[in-house]
Image (tube, rainbow, N blue to C red):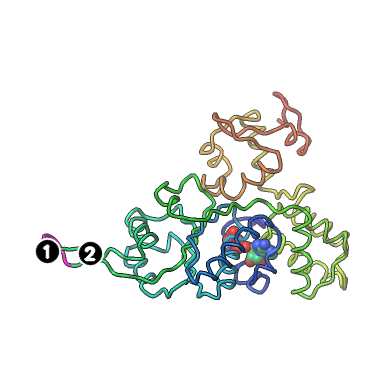
């Protein structure tokens, strides 16, 4: 399947461990966010306190997990990680929170998917560093409060709109990730090729950086695939020809779109006359869940100026017609 598809994440992350930046210096791009965060980290360290709870928002693959780890590293703190779907019962959360030490960085991915009972427990943990625990059953049941160590919660989400306001209000710091610009993407290509010990020409690095939808995870995956192509061709250096050929084989076009992205645009144009079409209808048409459509495909299509969200649904832009070589109107590609 494609390079961006969510189901490839776990496998890929094992592979990517060595490419994952550890310190703030290795974490490239997102300059403003990094500068502010560094100040907050220094200040917390000077006061010898735990860092305020941190809320990370942004599309997949932009470095939310990485940043959480970097923060732990910079604080010299322990790092614990889980994701909201893995927290099934309150005892799953309590099990982790009773073992955190002071200043632990506790990362919860997909925090918009917390169950209500767990979210309630988290409110008190974040605010008072205590756990509400019910012992006994029926009329004799009572709640006791268990103190826990002052930790830092880092909550990450691709969908800030789905996070409840009581939860949002308990985060002291919010970081919004944006797609990386070409210069930062190039720096990431260079860093990753250095670690993987592959040589890459300047124009090849630039082409790769432009074709990876402003997403570090995507550029690292592409680099590994292109390295394979170079190896088969016996090219010791990755040239722009090797990159161009690799991209062609992977069906990635000049805007960094994959086949599936182009299919989404094509479906809106051909079946819905360019839109508007509602997210649910569109998701069914492309055979994906609304979540996958909204989290993985749409953000970049919107950023690239190919799709717009309107109150009545998704609409393709003139650029999308141009990119696919189709004409607006009833004859659109049919
Ligand atoms: P997210 O949690 O937002 O889905 P990750 O933190 O897992 O994204 O990042 C995916 C991969 O991209 C990481 O393993 C790392 O190799 C790379 N990466 C992310 N952010 C950066 C960055 N700022 N600089 C360099 N590499 C990065």
Pick the front one: 188 or 257 = 188
Q: Secondary structure at mark 1?
A: helix
Residue at 70%, 38% in the rendered image: 306
Residue 75: percent from left, percent from top = 55, 72
The boundaries of the magenta stretch are 136-140
Task: Answer whether residue 8 is visible to the viewer in this image.
Answer: no
Which residue is painted at 29% across and 69% down in the image?
A: 146
Q: In the image, is 23 to the left or to the right of 90?
A: right
Predominant SS of the magenta segment: helix
For marks 2 and 1, the one nearer the N-term is 2
Residue 134's disc is 2
Res 140 label: 1
Residue at the (64%, 41%) spot, across then down = 264
Q: Which mark is residue 98?
A: none
**Camera sees residue 90:** yes
Residue 219's place in the image compared with 298, above or below, is below
Q: Using the image as rendered, state which of residue 269 and residue 204 is in the foreground.
A: 204
To which quarter of the image does residue 184 belong?
bottom right
Q: Residue visible at 65% across and 51% down?
A: 178
- 92 or 262, which lies in front? 92
């Amino acid at each position: 399947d494609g390079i961006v598809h969510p189901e490839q994440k776990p496998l890929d992350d094992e592979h990517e461990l060595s490419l994952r930046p550890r310190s703030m210096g290795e974490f490239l791009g997102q300059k403003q966010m990094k500068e502010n965060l560094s100040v907050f980290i220094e200040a917390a360290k000077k006061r010898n306190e735990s860092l305020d709870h941190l809320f990370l928002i942004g599309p997949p693959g932009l470095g939310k997990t990485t940043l959480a780890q970097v923060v732990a590293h910079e604080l010299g703190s322990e790092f614990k990680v889980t994701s909201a779907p893995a927290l099934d019962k309150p005892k799953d959360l309590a099990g982790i929170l009773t073992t955190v030490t002071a200043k632990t960085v506790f990362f919860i991915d997909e925090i918009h998917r917390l169950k209500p009972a767990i979210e309630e427990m988290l409110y008190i943990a974040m605010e008072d560093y205590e756990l509400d625990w019910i012992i006994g059953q029926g009329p004799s049941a009572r709640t006791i409060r268990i103190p826990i160590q002052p930790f830092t919660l880092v909550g990450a989400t691709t969908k800030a709109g789905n996070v409840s306001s009581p939860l949002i209000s308990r985060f002291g710091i919010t970081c919004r990730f944006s797609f990386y610009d070409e210069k930062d993407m190039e720096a990431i290509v260079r860093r990753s090729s250095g670690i993987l010990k592959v040589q890459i020409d300047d124009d090849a690095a630039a082409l790769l950086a432009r074709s990876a939808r402003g997403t570090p995870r995507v550029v690292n995956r592409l680099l590994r695939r292109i390295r394979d192509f170079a190896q088969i061709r016996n090219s010791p250096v990755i040239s722009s020809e090797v990159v161009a050929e690799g991209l062609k084989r992977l069906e990635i076009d000049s805007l960094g779109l994959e086949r599936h992205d182009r299919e989404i645009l094509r479906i809106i144009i051909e079946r819905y006359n360019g839109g508007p079409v509602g997210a649910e209808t569109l998701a069914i048409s492309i055979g994906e869940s609304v979540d996958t459509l909204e989290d993985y495909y749409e953000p970049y299509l919107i950023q690239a100026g190919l799709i717009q969200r309107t109150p009545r649904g998704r609409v393709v832009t003139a650029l999308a017609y141009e990119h696919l070589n189709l004409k607006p109107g009833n004859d659109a590609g049919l």
